[in-house]
Image (cartoon, helix red, strand yellow):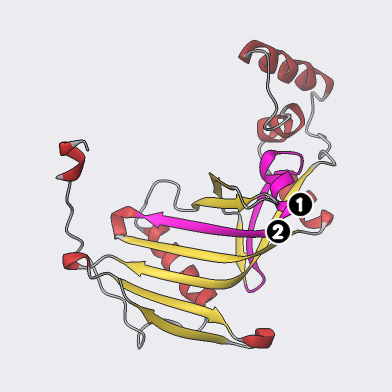
Amino acid sequence: MDPSLAKMRHEYALGALRKTEVDPDPIRQFQRWLQEAIAARLPEPNAMTVATADRTGRPYARVLLLKECDAEGFVFFSNYRSDKGRQLAENPCAALVFLWLELERQVRVEGKVSRVAPAESEAYFRSRPRESRLGSLVSRQSQVVASRRALDERFQQLAAQYPGDDIPMPAHWGGYRLRPELLEFWQGRRGRLHDRLRYRRRAGGTGWLLERLEP
């Protein structure tokens, strides 16, 4: 064991999490925390770890950006032919983790994922910067590429092919929506006696059960 890692300690003392103070709707509670992270000017406050698993149960994880959160769920965008796209096609269950370390907070979300409507993907695609749209056309996400030069040359070719703003959305690119079945809010506390409040969707999808978990 690395002794320097073993000795690393940070005492969490910025806040507390009480059942009487949180919103009964976990989506509204999440939106409240997200807005507080944005107001605190944290770097990439909408960054999240997205964990998936293939049909054998082997897990995978990577960091993406949340692009929408409403009563219907959490939305992110990707290449449907990517590794994560193939994993979600095989096993639509996924988990998200948001970490706002400066606020000593994290949120876990679990649920099932489905593709958003093509019109919704198109609307978001049109809102992206031109280079990002070209990048979606260029990238064969998760495939091996011979060199960075090959990737840059392909980008320049497509930039010349589409010199204006009319860049088509690739058919293999679009959004995913995770419909939450469970959300857990974590607030760091002293002595590692952290606050953990978990919302579980009730049977039939009507309302939420709020529970306190041991740290």
Mark 1 — residue? 89
The structure residue drawn at horizontal position 82% and vertical position 25%, both measured from the top left corner, is 162
Tag 2 near tag 1, CB within 8 Å: yes
Label 1 SS = helix
Nearer to us in this view, 205 or 26: 205
Quarter-of-image position of residue 172: top right
Q: Amino acid at mark 1?
A: Ala
Residue beneath the point at 42% across and 67% down: 33
x, y percent for residue 128: 67, 42
* Mark 2 vs mark 1, CA separation in Å: 6 Å
**Chain part drawn in magenta:** 71-100
Question: Among all residues in the image, which is located at the extreme front?
Answer: 56
159 and 171: which one is in front? Answer: 171
Asked if the magenta segment contains residue 181, the reply would be no
Instruction: Report crowding for label 2: few under 14, some 14 to 19, many 20 or more residues within 10 A (C-alpha).
Output: some
Numbered disc 2: secondary structure: loop
Q: In the image, what residue occupies the spot 82% across and 38% down?
A: 170
Disc assigned to residue 190: none
According to the picture, the residue beneath numbered tag 2 turns out to be 92
Q: Position of residue 99 (x, y in %)?
A: 40, 55
The image position of residue 57, as x and y in percent, is 63, 53
Q: Is residue 171 above or below residue 149?
A: below
The reply, left or right, for residue 72 in relation to residue 59 is right
Q: Residues within 10 Å of mark 1 (few under 14, many from 20)?
A: some
Kind of residue at badge 2: Pro
- Above or below: residue 17 compared with residue 167: below
Residue 26 drawn at (x, y percent):
51, 77
